[in-house]
Image: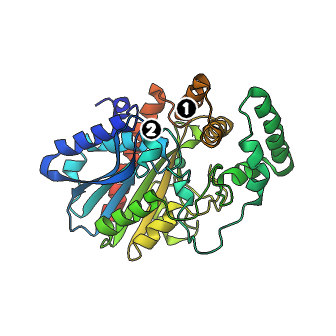
Amino acid sequence: MNPIDSFSRDYAEARARFLGALHALGDLAKHEAIAHPLKGPNGEDLATDVGLIGNPDAERVLVLISSTHGTEGTCGSACQFAWLNSDRPTSLPSNIRVVLIHAINPHGFAHVRRVTEDNVDLNRNFLDHDAPHPENPGYALLHDYLIPESWSAEARAEADKALQAFAEEYGQFALQAAISQGQYTHPDGLFFGGHAPTWSNRTLRAILEKHAGTARSVGLIDFHTGLGPHGTADLICNAAADSEDYQRLDRWYENGLSSPTAGTSTSAPLAGTMEHGVRQALPNARLSMITAEFGTYPIQRVFNALRGDHWLHARGTNDAALRKAIKDEVSKALYPDENDWKELVALRGRQLIDRATAGLANDP
Ligand SMILES: [Zn+2]
């Protein structure tokens, strides 16, 4: 299969193709669907689908996750689909089981949003919601400018001046961090981490406990898009750079890792990441997890696309052309739909899954 053909237009197509590829593997693959309570934009059912391949008793489990950030799922889904259609499922090392989690945030994927049905950034939602939430005073300062009253060119130009002033005073990366590190004060805002575990959070924990709960060693790749150079993967590792986990992953991926806490990543250090939830769900496993972040366009373009989407969600509009322009831009910002980009992502995605499989199978 041509690697660029592994990409789907939307959630419905991605789901159908994922299920078709699983089905084509016959007895080699098992499937489980966890139905989402809401529907897609065309009334279609939404679900997180789990594909299970390989030795069911294996103590080494590779978990591949798509669509943590909704519409970013086009990338992860393509990597999962390409893998299912390769010779890898039939030539898996006998000590490995693979758990493919397709569309952990199916509502965001189907509705072309990065967040879940409750406007929650799933990758900021995995923390103790009974404890005080982390504070983000920078975001509180910026919120009204990120999502202004009006989305007219004039109103945005005015708001952008305030964002620019923040960047000039504190630096561009400080602006990125304030916007994206996670905030728990503005439920209609950007990168809102929620006030309770959202459906996708609870569903992920249940899947991991059920299908990887007895594993001794778990490798995990969570596929994302939006940060970094076009078509390039930043392999983000949240483990401390001097930790055993980091060093093991660095071996697996041939020195390709980046670390938000060490300042070598495209990502700022984040609150409430999925990794916390994975570690809680799998307390007995050695966890080797990376976030594979594929770059699309410059960060200002990506942030502006997300601002537009959040503005649309918070304020609404009767202007059908504006609505379409905003949705097209958020889709494009997180899924360029260009052949070179797709080819780069598909090839790198296959490499990463191969590296994780080999690392997991061969580690002592
Ligand atoms: Zn993401």
Dot 1 alpha-carbon crowd within 10 angstroms: few under 14, some 14 to 19, many 20 or more: many
State the residue in front, 284 or 319: 319
**Where is residue 234 drawn, in percent x and y?**
54, 48
**Where is residue 126 drawn, in percent x and y?**
53, 64
Position above or below: 237 against 350: below
State the residue in front, 250 or 263: 263
Residue indicated by mark 2: 345
| Residue type for callout 2 | Val
Residue 120 appearing in the image: yes
Residue drawn where x is 48% and y is 31% of the image: 341
Residue 159 relative to residue 185: left or right: right
**Hey, which quadrant is residue 199 in on the image?**
bottom left
**Hey, which quadrant is residue 43 in on the image?**
top left
Residue 364 appearing in the image: no
**Where is residue 34 drawn, in percent x and y?**
31, 55
| SS assignment at label 1 | helix
Residue 327, label in figure: 1
